[in-house]
Amino acid sequence: MKSMFSYDLMESTRNTNEWLGASARAMASYPVWGLVPHPMFKVMSAWGRITERSFARMVIKPDWGIRTVVGEDGRDHLVEIETLVTRPFGDLIHFRVLGREQSKRRVLLVAPMSGHYSTLLRSTVTSLLPDCDVYVTDWHNARDIPVSEGKFDVEDYTLYLVDFMRHLGSDIHVVAVCQPAPLTLAATAYLAGVDPEAQPRSLTLIGGPIDPDAAPTEVTDFGRRLTMGQLEHLAIQRVGFKYAGAGRLVYPGLLQLASFISMNMDRHAQAFSDQILRASQGQASERDAHNRFYDEYLSVMDMTAEFYLSTVERVFKNREIAQNTFTVEGRHVDIGAITDVAVKTVEGEEDDISAPGQCKAALDLCTGLPEAMKASHLEPGAGHYGIFAGKSWRENIRPLVLRFIDQNSGDRPARKKAAKAKIRAV
């Protein structure tokens, strides 16, 4: 009950701040204050609007907001989101472009489960849609999943990816962004061992911690400093009575958000201070740069306790992926079994979360893959976010990823060789 009390206390604090913001906005907006034209009322109203909006966003799942895409014919085509596979902890969704022939490039974007919703990849999806048929893993908020649905850890996550890849077929190209990179590599290796025909054509790993010790950062050092017992005591709580997942052990989104903000407290404080000033002067707008960024940044989701703890223990502390000792349901997942899936890694030179070297370690693990099917790219001056969104992604990385996909869209060399050998044997 103690951890459930803590969860509800955080939610009560969030709710109270939202109410305070709404109250300040309403009070300072009364027309009667026009008789006393003091700037204090404009500042109070601006503070109230921004405070109410900010704390309200924390419990709202953002909308994808992708309505149309320009086709090769130069016309706008409507985009419809359809759910292809439904699972308790996450769905496989498809951005279907109406009135357009299916693109030859079929891309599965594996979104992170690291505190934010899959909509964090909105700009990535938007940039790929004109040239690709895009599928995305849409993870669910753990607070909304009843305890009766059971657990969800790194092995379950891996098996979800295996099911999604099998559903989409072997002509899919997988792009994993950040946190899911090591587990996506493991899912591909799992398929290589049990169902080789279901493997994707190519695998692009962007800024993921394949080997956290290859280039230690503040994130990896934090995991090293704390024992699993300390981490569980500090981070894990039970979902409160307000949500369908009441009683489920989670790493709360609000606690994660507090951690995110504390890493750059001065920058966030300045951003909100500047926005309040702009709003009081009538210069802020509904979809300005500040609101676009923070509407997404402040929208957080709970992770199941077992997923968070098993990620820290098995990926970061024990380095099971990096040492090729990862197991799923008792089966060793041998990354060396990948022999005909082209693998590319993308890293940012200024990435302070998954530093250069952590992701590229995947190429050394693929011992069964010919060097000609391996590729890597280090983006100069790019931080963690910039390697999958923003200018660096749009102008440099995206064209490289599309070229890599095109280069590996034909017949698989290993399978073609095996097929010829089978014919000769007959």
Image (tube, rainbow, N blue to C red):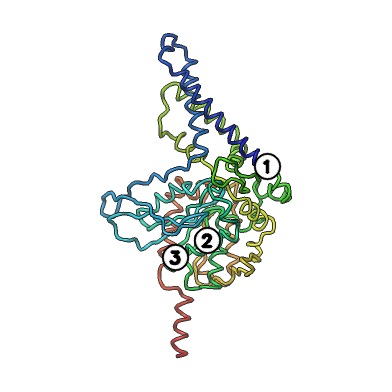
Residue 167 image label = 3
Mark 2, Cα crowd under 10 Å, few <14 / some 14-19 / many 20+, is: some
Instruction: Name the kind of residue labelled 2 in the image.
Output: Tyr
Residue 284 coordinates in the image, percent (x, y)? 42, 28
Mark 3, Cα crowd under 10 Å, few <14 / some 14-19 / many 20+, is: some
In the image, taking residue 257 as reference, residue 65 lies left or right, namely: left
Q: Which residue is mark 1?
A: 1
Using the rendered image of the protein, determine whether residue 350 is visible from the camera's viewpoint: no
Query: What's the distance in space between the residues labelled 1 and 3, CA to CA?
Result: 41 Å
Residue located 64% across and 47% down the image: 219
Q: Which residue is mark 2?
A: 160
Label 2 vs label 1, nearer the camera: 1
Residue 122 coordinates in the image, percent (x, y)? 44, 47
Q: Are marks 2 and 1 in contact (CB under 8 Å)?
A: no
Q: Are marks 1 and 3 in contact (CB under 8 Å)?
A: no
Mark 1, Cα crowd under 10 Å, few <14 / some 14-19 / many 20+, is: few
Q: Secondary structure at mark 2?
A: helix
Query: What's the distance in space between the residues labelled 2 and 3, CA to CA?
Result: 11 Å
Q: Are marks 2 and 3 in contact (CB under 8 Å)?
A: no
Using the rendered image of the protein, determine whether residue 60 is visible from the camera's viewpoint: yes
Instruction: Name the kind of residue labelled 3 in the image.
Output: His
